[in-house]
Each structure stands twice: as C-alpha cells, then as structure tokens.
Image: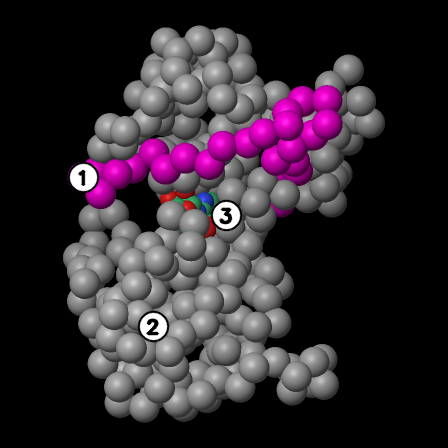
C-alpha cells in the first residue's frame, strides 16, 4: 500500500484537487482520495462527506465546511469557488472533497471552471457516485442483460428548487427501462405521477435507498403508484437514491447485505 501511494502524483502547493469521497462508506474512497487526504493542507468539504472519511486527513490540516443541505444556511457556490482560489493563491494544497463523484450532480464542473478562469492548476479525482455505489449496496444492478441495455441518471431538483422544467417526461419514460433519480425525495409524488402519465406502469418496481453504504442505510421496495405514500409512511428522509425499473426485482437474489443478516436469497429473482 505504501509503495503504491508513493507512485501517485505529488500534491503540489498552490493546487486544488477536486475529489469525490464516494457515497459514505470510507472503504469506497479511492487510493487517490486517500493520498489527497494524507497530503493536503486545507480541506474544504461538503455536507454529504462522511466523518470517517474526514478523519483520515493528515494531522494539522485545516478543515472547512462548505456544505449545502436543505434548511441550513448554505455557502453560495460563487463564494466556495472564490474561497478555493484564495486558498490556492495562499500556497495551500487545497483538497475540495465532495460526496460521490464531483462531476455527477455535484457542481464540480462549475468550481473547476472558476479555477481555469483564475489560472489555478487543478486535478480531478473521480469518486463512486451514490447512484452506482448505493445501488450496489442495496443489491440492485444498474444493468442486467435480460432487463435493460440503458440507464438514465436524473436530478429531481433544479436550482430553483423544483422538479427541473426541462425534463421531457415522454422521452424519459420511453428512453431507458431503468431510471435513477438523485435529489428526488421532495418531489417524489410529482415524479411518480409524471412517469405514469408518460406511460410507465403503476406496478413498476421502485426502490428508495437512503443513507446508502452507511450503517444507517435503509432500502424500501415499492412501486410507482405507491412510492410517495410508502416513503411518507416509513418516515424516510434524504439523502436517497430512487431507482425505477425491473432491476429492482433482482434484489430478491442479490441483497448481499441482507444475506449477512440472515435474509434468504433466491437464485431466480426474475423467475
Ligand atoms: N456528487 C454526488 C451527488 C450529489 S447530489 C454523487 O455523485 O453521488 C446529492 C444527492 O446524491 C442526494 O440528494 C442523494 O440523491 C444522492 N446521495 C448522495 N449520497 C447518498 C447516500 N449516501 N445515500 C443515498 N443517496 C445519496
């Protein structure tokens, strides 16, 4: 392990590394992310970065919260970008750590473009996005040969706080058999209704994966018609990934975490 870390790029002063921390489980950090945590001077992190990941930072490094989480006062995006520039200009090794992957609904592109504009050198370290890692921990494959050859990732929440206006629901409903929503909990009833109006069947399987990969992870299996009511009844809260499609049925065979707790798996979940 030490040998590998020594072959990774050196974190130079005055650089910003824009890095994904994965969905929560610190075991899902990449070696690049670990190396960055061990060599940064200043860490600017988001709300969804797990504390156990933060705990891996080199002693003496400064930690700065730039989180944006519903309800709490949030740092403005422009302020965060300006702060990264300021720290880099002060000669710090600046680690910008985000939940999941920085370029998947994470506004990493916006921050990186500010760095480009301001001539600050940067590196991007991908992370395991919640829509990938979260589903794997729930025992739901994103693709399965007999079920789907395509998958669509969608954000359920726009800058304006609504379901994004530019979603073409007809195209979405007919485009891919599996739909993975980020930030969709608040508008789940509307999402479910729009998809059914656009032709997706009411009984289509849906899974809600909350706090994916964390010890507090919860998975609710439901269907398109009932999902909003079921979520309310179960009292589920964000962060959550919502997956719509027949791949959810595979969970009966592939819920490996459930099996650790004694759940009986079936080898023919689609049968
Ligand atoms: N860049 C992140 C996404 C940020 S948007 C990534 O690639 O994963 C924030 C949304 O991501 C949340 O509203 C939720 O939909 C999803 N999310 C992030 N972490 C999650 C987790 N541990 N469990 C479930 N959903 C998560």
Residue 19, relative to residue 206: is it above or below?
below
Rounded to the nearest angstrom, the CA distance separating label 3 from label 1 is: 23 Å
Q: Residues within 10 Å of mark 2 (few under 14, many from 20)?
A: many
Tell me if I can see residue 237 in this picture.
no
Residue carrying label 2: 44
* Secondary structure of residue under mark 1: loop
Rounded to the nearest angstrom, the CA distance separating label 1 from label 2 is: 25 Å
Residue 87 occupies quadrant: bottom left
| Coloration mode | one colour
Some atom of ligand 1 lies within 8 Å of the CB belonging to the residue at label 3 = yes
Q: Earlier in the sequence, mark 3 or mark 2?
A: 2
Is the stretch drawn in magenta largely helix, strand or loop? Answer: loop
Direction right: furthest residue? 267
Q: Residues within 10 Å of mark 3 (few under 14, many from 20)?
A: many
Q: Is residue 151 magenta?
A: yes
The region drawn magenta spans: 137-161
* Dots 3, 2 in contact, CB < 8 A: no
Residue 225 occupies quadrant: top left
Question: Viewer-proximal residue, 222 or 180?
Answer: 180
Q: Where is residue 70? Give x, y as percent.
A: 25, 47
* Secondary structure of residue under mark 3: helix
* Dots 1, 2 in contact, CB < 8 A: no
Rounded to the nearest angstrom, the CA distance separating label 3 from label 2 is: 20 Å
Residue carrying label 1: 160
Q: Where is residue 216? Give x, y as percent.
A: 51, 49
Residue carrying label 3: 130
Identified at 58% across, 48% down, the residue is 133
């Amino acid at each position: 392990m030490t040998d590998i870390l020594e072959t990774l790029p050196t974190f130079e002063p005055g650089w910003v590394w824009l890095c994904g921390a994965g969905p929560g489980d610190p075991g899902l950090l990449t070696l690049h992310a670990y190396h960055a945590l061990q060599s940064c001077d200043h860490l600017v992190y988001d709300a969804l970065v797990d504390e156990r990941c933060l705990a891996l930072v080199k002693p003496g490094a400064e930690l700065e919260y730039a989180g944006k989480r519903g309800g709490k006062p949030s740092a403005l995006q422009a302020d965060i970008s300006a702060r990264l520039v300021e720290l880099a200009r002060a000669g710090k090794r600046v680690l910008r750590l985000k939940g999941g992957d920085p370029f998947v609904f994470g506004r990493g592109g916006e921050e990186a473009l500010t760095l480009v504009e301001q001539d600050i050198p940067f590196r991007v370290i991908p992370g395991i996005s919640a829509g990938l890692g979260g589903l794997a921990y729930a025992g739901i494959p994103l693709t399965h040969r007999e079920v789907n050859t395509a998958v669509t990732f969608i954000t359920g929440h726009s800058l304006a706080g609504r379901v994004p206006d530019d979603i073409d629901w007809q195209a979405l409903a007919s485009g891919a058999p599996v739909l993975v929503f980020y930030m969709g909990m608040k508008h789940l009833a509307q999402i479910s209704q729009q998809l059914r109006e656009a032709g997706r069947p009411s009984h289509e399987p849906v899974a809600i994966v909350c706090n994916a990969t964390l010890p507090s992870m919860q998975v609710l299996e439901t269907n398109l018609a009932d999902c909003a009511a079921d979520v309310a009844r179960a009292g589920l809260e964000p962060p959550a990934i919502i997956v719509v499609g027949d791949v959810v049925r595979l969970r009966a065979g592939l819920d490996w975490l459930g099996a650790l707790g004694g759940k009986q798996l079936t080898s023919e979940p689609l049968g």
